[in-house]
């Protein structure tokens, strides 16, 4: 199995305090490594923690997730990926957030398809942390470097007060 090992757990802080601090679009960057193995599948997770409690917002909506390669430098694209699924996990509940199955050669950054357009607030355990599990497949026959690949996954979360 190809492994997806977490390089860093992302955390982002919304400026200020109180409800007004939650208005607007907040971007956070997470990164994880997809490494070659005996099969072309991989799995991993990221946890995103925010300072303010999401229960004080009216809604939290996932706007976009894009992928590009951090390392090794000079990697032209993310064509080493064949499929990718991102699900939020809270206890035993899993909810599909994003998918990707188009990673064309020569395209440095690829936007995943957002599948969940509902309110993300119920998925924040303790109102502050959301867990996203990533699984997918890599392109058979891809020429992997000895140290694997580093893939930067960017999640853009919109938190809106009505």
Image: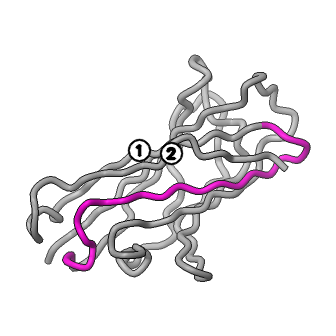
Please state the extent of the stretch shown in magenta in the rendering. 36-57
Picture mark count: 2
Residue 9, placed above or below residue 117 = above
Position of 111 with respect to 105 (left or right) is left
Q: How far apart are the two marked residues, 1 and 2, measured between alpha carbons? A: 6 Å
**Looking at the image, what colour scheme do you see?**
one colour
The relative height of residue 28 versus residue 160 in the rendered view (above or below) is above
Residue that appears at 78% across and 22% down? 146
Foreground residue among 49 and 80: 49
Name, please, the residue furthest toward the top.
74
Query: Mark 2 or mark 1, which is nearer the start of the sequence?
Result: 1
Q: Residue at x 78, y 27 (%)?
A: 144
x%, y% of residue 82? 73, 47
Q: Position of residue 1 (x, y in %)?
A: 85, 50
Position of residue 132 in the picture relative to residue 14 (left or right) = right
Tag 2 secondary structure? strand
Q: Is residue 8 left or right of residue 5?
A: left
Residue 47 lies, in percent from the top left, at 48, 58
Q: Residue most toward the front?
A: 126
Question: Residue sitting at 37 percent across and 76 percent down?
Answer: 126
Residue placed under numbered mark 1 in the picture: 29
With 64 as the anchor, is 17 left or right in this view? left
Pick the front one: 144 or 44:
44
Asked whether the residues under the numbered discs 1 and 2 touch, taking CB atoms below 8 Å apart as contact, a structural biologist would say: yes
The residue beneath circle 2 is: 153
* Vertical order, 7 against 59 (above or below): above
Q: Is residue 50 magenta?
A: yes
């Amino acid at each position: 199995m190809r492994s997806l090992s977490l390089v860093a757990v992302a955390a982002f802080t919304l400026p200020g305090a109180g409800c007004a601090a939650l208005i607007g679009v907040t971007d956070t960057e997470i990164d994880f490594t997809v490494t070659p193995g005996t099969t072309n599948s991989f799995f991993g997770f990221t946890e995103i923690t925010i300072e303010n409690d999401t229960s004080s917002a009216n809604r939290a909506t996932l706007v976009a997730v894009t992928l590009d390669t951090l390392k090794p430098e000079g990697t032209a694209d993310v064509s080493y990926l064949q499929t990718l699924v991102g699900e939020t996990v809270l206890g035993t509940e899993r909810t599909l957030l994003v998918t990707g199955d188009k990673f064309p050669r020569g395209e440095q950054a690829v936007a995943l398809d957002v599948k969940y357009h509902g309110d993300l607030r119920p998925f924040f355990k303790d109102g502050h942390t959301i867990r996203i599990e990533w699984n997918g497949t890599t392109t058979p026959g891809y020429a992997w470097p000895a140290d694997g690949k580093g893939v930067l996954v960017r999640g853009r979360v919109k938190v809106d007060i009505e």
